[in-house]
Amino acid sequence: MYLKHFGLAERPFGLTPDTTFAVPTRAHKAALNTLLVATQGGEGFIKITGEVGTGKTLLCRRFLGQASHKTRTCYIPNPQLAPRALLLALGEELGVLLPASATEYQLQTGICKILLKYANEGRQVIVCIDEAQAIPVPSLETLRLLSNLETEKRKLIQVVLFGQPELDDKLALKVLRPLRQRIAFAYRMETMPRDEIGPYLMHRLRVAGYVGPQVFDDDAIAHIRVASGGTPRLVNILAHKALMLAFGEGRSVVEERHARAAAADTAANNQPTTTRWWRWFAS
């Protein structure tokens, strides 16, 4: 509802991971570089962890978008699957045509054959698993066994695990020690530092079509930083609500009081709830 007021073509602070709006923060650049170096090296497992809302899914999509034509990528968004269901999902991503009634052995055999086919063609296979903290332990073991397949030069399949910190707790289990030892690269995504919040907000506004001076004043930016803790998803939520408040007053600049009211209405912020932002429209 504030798009026309601020001269925007689309919402700048949506929660859907949209690579068009990706901001090259230091954390994302470091994580992406880790992925690129690790996959070029042909290692088996790579782990990317971070708190909720730090942009792991967006990072995954950016990484998949940069894959070369010689790379066959697979994306598993919901890994809370038993081993057989995981194999079915992986086989579907790889183009393995097997009936749903196929046994685990038949699924594993079919996947092995197509992995060998891709290897003979000089193609790399990378499997990206989002929300990896939810994957059952037996399914992780199934992935480890698949990663045993290799040529003299490299693994036939590489697995990238994107997950919340709880993934580390799961991997610490004694039964997963063999898999843990195969994680050649790992990166922990941090929140945005203070100096990145302002450029982050402005970048997303520019991508959405904004042309003009700074929309969020320095005090508003500072308050969003404190209330969000630098978590990108929370920054987006607070910025969206603050824009609505400024629009409701007919203002072109978001001030600290707008940011405070937005934070007060956001359960995950670092401050107690005091005033509901939507009441500003009724006054």
Image: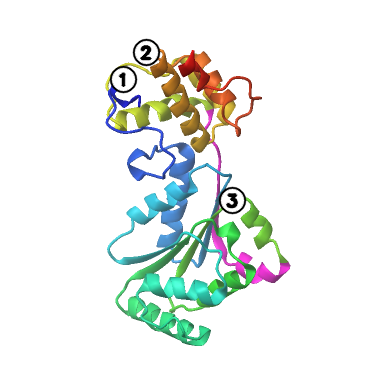
| First to last magenta residue range | 174-193
| Residue carrying label 3 | 164
Amino acid at pointer 1? His
Q: Earlier in the sequence, mark 2 or mark 3?
A: 3
Residue positioned 33% across, 53% down in the render: 65
Residue 13 visible within the image: yes
Mark 3–mark 1 Cα distance, whole angstroms, equals 38 Å
Mark 2–mark 1 Cα distance, whole angstroms, equals 8 Å
Amino acid at pointer 3? Gln
Q: Earlier in the sequence, mark 3 or mark 1?
A: 1
Residue 155 visible within the image: no
- Residue 19, by quadrant, is top left
| Residue carrying label 2 | 250
On screen, residue 267 above or below 219: below
Extreme residue toward the front, this view: 282
Q: Residues within 10 Å of mark 1 (few under 14, many from 20)?
A: some
Based on the picture, tell me whether residue 49 belongs to the magenta stretch.
Answer: no
Q: From the viewer's perspective, tell me whether residue 122 is left or right of residue 198.
A: left
Q: Earlier in the sequence, mark 2 or mark 1?
A: 1
